[in-house]
Amino acid sequence: MIELKEGQKAPVFTAKDQNGKEISLSDFSGKELILYFYPKDNTPGCTAEACSFRDNYQSLQNQGFAVLGVSTDDEKSHQKFISKYTLPFSLIADTEKEIVEAYGVWVEKSMYGKKYMGVARKTFIIDKNGIIRKIIDKVDTNNSSEQVLNSIK
């Protein structure tokens, strides 16, 4: 499994967002990017995390950040999630699991003794030059945006 570290170049990607529009890491060149990975649309923790970024989106933008969420859900699921919670940022539909694997967040999980593969909740802060500035492994879903801001002070 890939284990990315702070200071490394972020893995490049090109994938489709909720509207089928291609988004690449290079689209964020010159901006700080909050690239957050989450397990599933419309689940309690993932909703809290997305809404935290939504509620503080203007503040994050004012500080030069773009926000991009990634899960293995499809475009239609992302459209519903964005619409339901009025999310002002794009969500990548990584149905082929290429980005989650490149970032090392496609991992074995366990629930009720059953093992399965899924997306680990993790946030990467990528600087203007495409370098991973900070990795947040233990995401506080209710305060994810504040956690990002506090981690870079």
Image: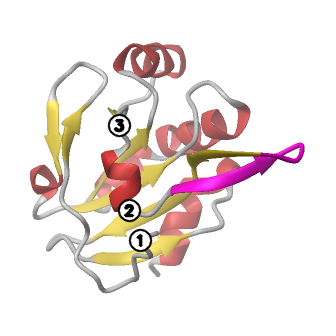
Q: Secondary structure at mark 1?
A: loop
Give the CA separation, mark 3 to mark 2.
12 Å
**Point 27% across, 29% down: residue:** 17
Earlier in the chain: of badge 2 and badge 1, it is 1
Q: Secondary structure at mark 2?
A: loop
Q: Secondary structure at mark 3?
A: loop
Residue assigned mark 1 = 2
Nearer to us of marks 2 and 1 is 1
Q: Which region is colored magenta?
A: 106-114
Left or right position of 27 against 94? left
Residue 74: x and y, percent? 40, 22
Residue type (three-letter) at the residue carrying disc 3: Asp
Earlier in the chain: of badge 1 and badge 3, it is 1
Give the CA separation, mark 2 to mark 1.
7 Å
In the rendered view, would you say 77 is above or below 35?
above
Residue 103: x and y, percent? 38, 62
Residue 35 sits in which quadrant? bottom left
Magenta-drawn stretch contains 87: no
Coloring scheme of the render? secondary structure
Residue assigned mark 2 = 103
Left or right position of 82 against 63? right
Residue assigned mark 3 = 94
**Point 40% across, 51% down: residue:** 100
Q: How many marks?
A: 3
Q: Are marks 2 and 1 in contact (CB under 8 Å)?
A: yes
Residue type (three-letter) at the residue carrying disc 1: Ile
Q: Nearer the viewer, residue 148 or 7?
A: 7
Q: Main secondary structure of the magenta part?
A: strand
